[in-house]
Structures are given as structure tokens and as C-alpha cells.
Amino acid sequence: MINRNALLMLSTVVFFALSHTATAGQLPKNIEEMRVSKAGQTLPHVVNRYQAINETLEVKLQQATDELSVTEMAAQQGHRLWQQAVRDVQSGHDDDRSLYWSRLGMRNTLKQDRAGFNIADWQREILVNAVEKSSRGFSDIEFDPNTHIHILVTGFDPFFLDRNIGQSNPSGLAALALDGYRFNVNGKVAQIETVMIPVRFNDFDNGIIESLLTPFYRNNSLDMLFTISMGRDNFDIERFPGRNRSADAPDNLNVLTGASHRNPKAPLFNGGTSNDGKLNGPEFVQFSLPVEQMQAVKGRWTVKDNRQVRSLSRGQFTASSLAELQNEISVEGSGGGYLSNEISYRSILLRDQFNLNLPVGHIHTPRVKGYDAQTEAEIVEQIKAMIAAAATSL
């Protein structure tokens, strides 16, 4: 079931927004949404896999008569998309891409299609945000009270799509494959719940990770957290995430931060409204995953405890301890200088701010070029085994 609290919050936003002056119109497509046309021509079987859900959204938007019901409808259709993608993958269709492209198609519909009433731009933004949250699994995190070990896993959207419009992301496939997965460990039942994270700097600057994790950290209701992304040749467990961005690579909106190895930049926090606007924390933090158990898993790829970092004064080196990094300015954490590193840093920093003794860390998967169903299925199976092995330490 979709989280009713999430719907209530969305409806409340709409209710208070009703005092605004409404003008009919359309919202322009952003860079990410504009790629849908090319993807549809190049990968029609991928892009149109969930076309029926978008068609239902179009019809319901045209039939809508008020803001509250249309917002709930958008959230429900987004949730339907997430659930369908999860069912698909767990039935053997090892492809994360249809979820990504279908979400963008739904965003385009909500931004530009005719509605059944005089809908304003700010109302369209609310509908787009409703689909964003629900189609990423954010409204679908429900741990069964009869399970004993609660594990949260995050994956990422495909990225670098201007290089390869057909690019997949094994971490996203893992998120879809593992959502709701249960297994037995030491006489206890463990359950995994998952979400999909956008590859967009602005979402991170506006606190998407902190908003996701704060309720779980505040209630101490998680037993383990894995953030996952696509990385290098083998599996890397990233020991020392760094605070700063330094990658000169664009996000999915083709945004560049201006950061580099010579000019690392701290990310923002909550849109830059807190203190000096920068994310405040130590230059490096350390994971708390049971890496030895995870390395013991046999599979096609080796599993590395990656301690390699980069600092302004020392360049790239292998750190032996967090104490060694205390006086360094971070350029790259073990996970690099992009959002893979940042999600790990933010999740560990927030855990430390809540003073929790919780295993948290980042898995970089082997990279794939484009899409490779067999290789990605094997990556997911090894991830599943690594998480199960890690759970034995609890």
C-alpha cells in the first residue's frame, strides 16, 4: 500500500497552495525529460514497456476536477510504476531502464498535457514531485513488524546517458530485485526495503538523503544500510568517504559543479539555507560495514576493502586509518568525487550525528557498458549474498 502519511503531506501542500493565483499553462521539459524522445526512437521496447501506466495517467489528468484528488492520483500512478518495475525484475526481467524512462514520460505528461481543470504551473510541480517520490519507492518502505532485521538499500538511476542512451545501472537493478526480499539469518528473519536515488546534484543539495534517512535514524528503526552505485572493475566497499565534490562529470541534468581535483567543493545542505550553506562535517568519515564477512562471499568478482583517497596536500594515497586523514582536505573519498561518494558520506555523517551504532557503507559494483542482462543479474546475486553475509554479524 502507498504510504498514507506521504499522501496526506502532499495534499496538505496543495491545500495551503490554493490561495495562490492559478494560471493555466505548461512547464518546460528539462534536459533529462527531453532525452525521452531520443530514447523512444532508440529503445522503444524499453521506453514503452509501461506505457499503459502513463496512458492511465493521461486519462485521469484529463478527467481531474480538483487539486487534492489529482495529487493523490499522481502519487498512486507513480507507486504503481514502482511496484510494476519491482514485479518485473523479480520475475526475471533484469532491466532497470524502463522504470527510469517511464518516470520521465510521466513527468512530461504532468508538465505538458491538458488537465480537466485550470491547472497552474505550481500545481503541475506538485504533481511531478508526487510521481518522483512514489515511483522511486520512497512511499513504499514498509518493514513487516514480524521481521527482526531491517535493511535499507539504495540504488541509482542510469547516468551518462548522452554517452550511451541505452545505459543501465546495476545498482538500480539491485534495488528493484531486492525490494521486499526476506531471508533467514541466525534464526531471525531479515527484510530488505529499497529506494532509487536520482543522479542530480540539486536533489542532494536540497537534502534528499537526509530527508530519507532521518526518520529511520531518529527512531533507530534500521539494522543496516547499504548505498550502492556502479563503479570500477570489481566490487569495492568504500572505507573512507570524503566530504568534497571533485569530479568534473555532469549529472543527469548536465549540471557541472565547477569542482575539480585542484578545486574541491563542499556540497550544499538543504539548498544552502543552513549556516554558510555548505554541508558541515569532517573531511573524511569511515564505513561501519562488516567487510570481512562480505569479502568472504565467493563470486565472479573480487570484493575490495578500498582505502584509496585523494587530498589536496598528498594527492592520491592509501589511507591506513581515519586518524591519518584528520588534517587533510578531501578531494576524493574512497568512492571518488561524485554522487556515489557523496551518498555514502551523507548517510554516515547523519548516522554519526544521531550517535548510532549502525552498520552503514557503500558498495561500488562492477561497471557495465550499456546493458548486459546476464552480467547484471550476476552482479545482483553477488550483492544479495554479500548483504546476507553482512547480516550474520548482527
Image (cartoon, rainbow, N blue to C red):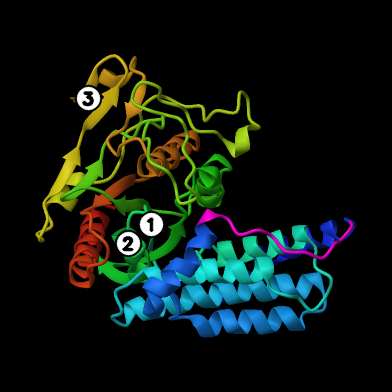
Instruction: Please tell me which of labels 3 and 1 falls first in the chain.
Output: 1
Instruction: Please tell me which of labels 1 and 2 falls first in the chain.
Output: 1
Q: Which of 160 and 334 lies nearest the eye of the viewer?
A: 160
| Majority SS type along the magenta span | loop
Could you tell me which residue is drawn at 33 percent across and 18 percent down? Answer: 326
- Cα separation, mark 3 vs mark 1, equals 29 Å
Residue 206, placed above or below residue 327: below
- Please indicate whether residue 32 sits to the left or right of residue 368 in the image: right
Q: Is residue 296 magenta?
A: no
Residue 141, placed above or below residue 233: below
Could you tell me which residue is drawn at 72 percent across and 65 percent down? Answer: 8
Q: Amino acid at mark 1?
A: Leu
- Cα separation, mark 2 vs mark 3, equals 29 Å
From the top left corner, tell me how far across and down residue 30 is, in percent: 57, 55
Res 286 seen here:
yes
CB within 8 Å, label 1 to label 2: yes
Please, what secondary structure does the residue beneath circle 3 have? strand
The residue beneath circle 2 is 167
Q: Residues within 10 Å of mark 3 (few under 14, many from 20)?
A: some
Please, what secondary structure does the residue beneath circle 2 have? loop
Q: Amino acid at mark 2?
A: Gln
The residue beneath circle 1 is 161
